Image (cartoon, coloured by chain):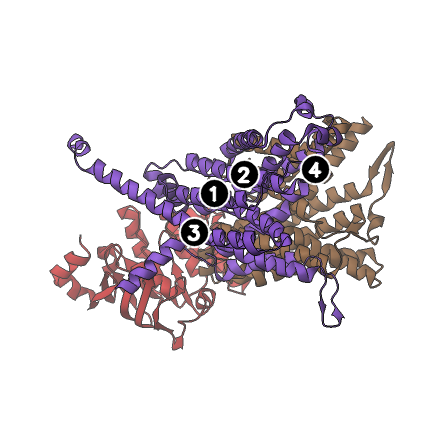
Chain colours: A red, B purple, C brown
Amino acid sequence: MLSVDNLVVRYGAVSAVRDLNLKVGRGELVALLGPNGAGKSSTINALTGLVTPASGRIVLDGQDISRVRTEDRIRAGLTSTPEGRHIFANLTVGENLRLGAATRRDPKGVRGDIDRFLALFPVLSERYGQAAGTLSGGEQQMLAISRSLMSRPKLLLLDEPSLGLAPKIVERIFDFIGELKREGLTLLVVEQNARQALRFADRVYVVSTGTLRYEGPPAELADEHGLFNLYIGG
Amino acid sequence: MSQVLENTAPPIVAASQKGSALRRSLIGGLVTSLPVLAIGLAILNFAPTYYTFLALGAFVNLIVVVGLQVFMGNSNIANLGHSAFVGLGAYGVAILSTPLAMKKLSIPNAPFGFATLQLDPVSSAIIALIVVGVIAAVSGKVISRLSGVTATIVSLALLIIVHSVFLNWTDLFKGNQAFFGIPKVVGLPWMLVFSVVVIVAARLFKDSRWGLQLRASAQSPQAAAALGIDAKRLRLMSWVLSALICGLAGVLYAYFAGTISPKLFYFQMIFNTLAMLILGGMATVTGAVTGVIVLSVGLEFIRSIESGVTIGSIQLPQLLGLSGVALGVVIVLCMAFRPSGISGRYELDELFSRYFRRNAK
Amino acid sequence: MDYALQQLLNALAFGAEYSLVALGLAVVFSIMGLVNFAHGEIIGVSAYSVFLAAALGLTSPFVAVLLAVAAAALAAIAFERVAFRPVRYAPTTTGLLTAFGVSIVVQNLFMLLISPKPQSVSILNGLNQMWFVGPFAVSSLQVMELIVSGLTILALVLFLNRSTLGLAIRAASRDFATVRLMGIRANRVIATAFAISGALAGIAAVFIIARRGSVSPDLGFSLVLKAFVACVIGGFGSLAGAAAGGMLLGFIEVGLLVALPQEYGGFKDALTYVIIVALLVYRPEGLLGQRVELGDKEI
């Protein structure tokens, strides 16, 4: 579904991502792990097109999207829930969800999807007319993921969904991510919190200082204790 | 521990470094003013009178642009009101130094006894600059507290306030009409001297501890604040220095032209000098100098077309507005393709030393 | 009583006009941080379009009004496409100076291509009459200005709160990158914001032409300076602040006109600005503005 070849991202003279190769198959949940500053977010931003890679190819469903604008990548079925959630704080919960479906032209389907997420997260239903900025961190993350799903993506990129959240809430968010995988969605999850990310992952990539260090099934990563501790910890 | 440090080598090292830094920036300022001196001396010795008069105007612009650079280049806040200070300087000396016989004709009803007061040009200039300084300090107090965009709008408001006072306080400023009879005591030599002084002063400020801190806080306000830099005080400082330089330009203008009127110190001057600074590059004093030289020549050329030229047997019509269009286009193109202007980040002397160092290797 | 009512209507009408223009500035500033000094020239393009159409034989005031609004919206979109897009992601000062440059170019083009002198336009004079309501004589133009501005602002509020594009504009004022992550085209959001901004300027242009009966190259410049000041006291970037600031400015101006003796009337503008600068001393962020929060991790 997604294949990334020799991706390089530079900020001036500093290379954030060096020669990264990565594949995500249809229906897979792939985890991209690594410590702070490893180049994970730069990879995601290169995938969505918010930063322009210095070189490399990004292919989605057989179509080279390396030079395609962010907006059109989303329209092609790739969506991302950015790090730090980035919900629209000055808009209401309902308005956030509606904007998530901005690319769709089926009002009925959109309404149906909104109802589905409100049923799934009753707290969003209670706060439907409130400014999204008043939600708690966990609620904002639920809103952010729901908002991404409103566009009915083929591939969802999740950038640090556990960031700044209490363990219990992280558990719930990842339960939901597992649910999405069972429903058949393809996911690429970027995480520092390896334990949670490995719960549902089919395959794992580990990066540090912009370079790929490990690629394979999660079980082996857990076995190779050295690598696990070195790059991920706890 | 800290006491030991204070009593041993570092202060001496720091002092000698400070000395050499000061010397370097002094020499840098002088290097930057060399082209100005060369052009000035050439005009002084070889050019006909008409060009001398044009050159005087260009030198006034030079001083204004350098003054503008002191604030804009270091604080990175656009100032669209600096010609107010040029006007205040010019009207200051006009009111103080114009001979009494002339005043009887022009401002017989001036308040505060100004109608019967005549000072020598030097004291007039000093008092005018003090007035400019006080007004700059008061307005700067407000402006230095505001965020970038708001500060720019308030600088414009200041221009309109001052202009409107010139126009409406007819007893003192003669309103819309020309204020004439100011003693013409400044010629090209003095103008050259002050140009060099101003260029060196702007360079010294830029390289000083305050200039450096101000530039740092313009780049990254939070990082600078975390280092204990008081950005407001530094903005105020550069605002007042900038205003004094602009005021000086006004004083010199009044003393060479002998006649002034409010519209000289309004938007036209803002357009001209801003375009010069942007074209040259506002980050450096060299940029200010470069912009003035290039645009002064360019504008003179365009003005000659504007007033209608004859090519062969074809008489082109008057094209009023052509120079304005050119100025605007210069600003827009610069901002789009080279926001750092012609000279970019380096001063002239820094370019020289980089060049020689590369060749030495 | 008659006098007080008349002055109140004056203040409201002035205020409404400033609000319209200030809102146009705020819509653009809020989403892309552009301080659009060329907004006055959008008013200028609108006014000169009406002038040219009238010179070419247009007689219907209704068509002239439509033309004014459409020309302004198109001019705003064109300015963005040609001049502001290259500096879209540049620092605020760069955008501000670009807009200043555009303003100079367009003003001088009016001079160069049409004339430096004011040109008379009488097509909209019919809007400016005296209406007699019971014992009061009121200017039809002022009443219309008030009603039309009110309706326009209402329509703007509805658009921003109901339509997807409106929501996107509000969202973009805080977080443009994430709006793009919703698959919404940045160019479309920005073009819409400029079109709105231009249309508001066009409506203001209609009133200006009707009141003055003439057009001149610097027609919109001083009005836009005042609108900027309205934005500043309202809080730069806040739409509600722009509208409120415009009204406040109208009241300050009319208040000064009433309070100042005739011979000091010329100081009205200067004093208005002095009062506003004094207000800023107490509230540097404006009436409805918020202190800008910096340092959020940008994506």
**Of label 1 and label 2, which has the lower sequence position?**
1
Q: CA distance from mark 4 to mark 1?
A: 27 Å
Q: Secondary structure at mark 1?
A: helix
| Residue B16 in view of the camera | yes
In the rendered image, residue B355, in percent from the top left (x then y), is placed at 34, 61
Find disc 1 in the rendering and name its residue.
B198
In the rendered image, residue C220, in percent from the top left (x then y), is placed at 69, 49
Q: CA distance from mark 3 to mark 1?
A: 11 Å
Find disc 2 in the rendering and name its residue.
B248
Q: Secondary structure at mark 2?
A: helix
The chain letter for the residue carrying disc 4 is: B
Please state, as top left, top right, bottom left or bottom right, where the C terminus of chain B lies in the image: bottom left
Mark 4 burial class by Cα count in 10 Å: few <14, some 14-19, many 20+: some
Point out which mark residue B32 bears: 3
Find disc 4 in the rendering and name its residue.
B180
In the rendered image, residue C143, in percent from the top left (x then y), is placed at 78, 41
In the rendered image, residue B39, in percent from the top left (x then y), is placed at 51, 54
Quarter of the image for residue C139 reads top right
**Of label 3 and label 1, which has the lower sequence position?**
3
Amino acid at pointer 2? Leu
**Callouts 1 and 2 on one subunit:** yes
Mark 3 burial class by Cα count in 10 Å: few <14, some 14-19, many 20+: many
Q: Secondary structure at mark 3?
A: helix
The chain letter for the residue carrying disc 1 is: B
